[in-house]
Image (cartoon, grey):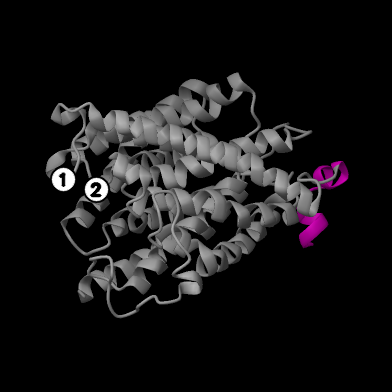
Amino acid sequence: MDSGSITWVLISALLVWIMSPGLALFYAGLGGPKNRLHTIGTSLILMGVASIIWFLLGYTLAFGGGNDWLGNLKFWGLNQISFSHSTRGLAIPDGLFAIFQGMFPIITVIIIIGSVIGRMRLRALIVFISLWLLVVYSPLAHMVWDNGFLAKLGAIDFAGGTVVHISSGVTGLVLAYLVGPRRDQSYEKIYSPYIFVGGFLLWFGWFGFNAGSALAANDQAILALMNTWLASAAALLPGAWMSYRMRGHLLLADLVTAGLSGLVVITPAAGFVHPWAAIVMGAIAGVVGIYSITLIKRHFGYDDTLDAFGIHGIGGTLGAILTGVFADKSLGNAGGLVNGHWELLGQQLIAIVITLLLVVVGTVLIAGITRLLVGPLRVSEDDEAIGLDLRLHL
């Protein structure tokens, strides 16, 4: 065990944790005033739900060995987890590994609610998220990070491009279709201070999200932190240009969105690419991120309320693809097109397709089970018109 690595991963776990209230605040600023308190309150409830699900069954299904698709129940309730040594060949104890990995499903489920907040019943949302963590998130984490099927295929995901971003964004999109669009989609005034402070907390926490995924205080953590910094910075100016071009004015929410798009795209590649590649990836993401929440959203007509799919679903997919382009074998175990290899790009594309199939099928099935257990997914027309702040929180 290495005390420096233990300290760094402990700090990183706290940084990832702070992203969840940050995202809640960011979403509250983007949404209309009649659901702001509900957005924050729902996020806090789901932070508790996701934590307990992870403790009981999520961790063991994700990291309990098992087969290529799912872990076993060896570590249910974090049973047999050591807080003093590692069985995974790491410089940190298994207990700390479980803590750090447990912060990821929390932020993942809060990303999802951005697509349907204000029109999905809280009871249904709690049941859906509880089942989703077991049926979709844990198997996907196992396949990618516990030497499961996608890892053996050769696909790579440093900190959650597929596991966190594609899974949450696509789940949000499918839920938005299943629940149906808002009855009133007229523009509701955003609250910029919430957007800025929430976005800043997300940005700050993301350094732990990516650099902590090295699981040690080492050169890869330094590289991942630098790439996270540069990709987000590189996304800002192209994103600002795209925002002005699309809207005719520069919107603060778009600046934050551009920065977040750079963070999303670098997540699967953070420890595997050189800094110059991170800058290129971030610049591309800044343009694609704004394009996703404006033209693509309008063209296909889906009602992704707070753009969970536009930022995370599309951004995570772009990041997984570009990882197959820019991953350098001198920095990890796999090289992409920059090393003259096509294989990794193909493996990344297969991983994306498998992730999409698991997420779409799993979301539809879980939504059906949720209806059977607690009734309709959607709030009543009166509740939607009044807003859930007044109905549930005030």
The answer to whether residue 237 shows anywhere in this view is: no
- Magenta highlight on residue 383: yes
Task: Determine the main secondary structure of the stretch shown in magenta.
Answer: helix
Element marked by disc 1: helix
Element marked by disc 2: loop
x, y (%) of residue 172? 59, 40
Q: Which residues are magenta?
A: 381-394
x, y (%) of residue 316? 42, 38
x, y (%) of residue 155? 31, 39
Say what amino acid the circle numbered 1 marks: Leu
Q: Is residue 96 left or right of residue 102?
A: left
Of residue 386 and residue 149, the one placed in the foreground of this image is 149
Residue at 55% over, 26% down: 294
CB under 8 Å between discs 2 and 1: yes
The image quadrant where one finds the N terminus is: bottom left
Of residue 266 and residue 331, the one placed in the foreground of this image is 331
**Tag 1 or tag 2, which sits nearer the N-term?**
2
Quadrant housing residue 269? top left
**Mark 1 — residue?**
331
The image quadrant where one finds the C terminus is: bottom right
Say what amino acid the circle numbered 2 marks: Gly
Q: Residues within 10 Å of mark 2 (few under 14, many from 20)?
A: many
Residue 271 disc label: 2
Whole-angstrom CA distance, mark 2 to mark 1, is 7 Å
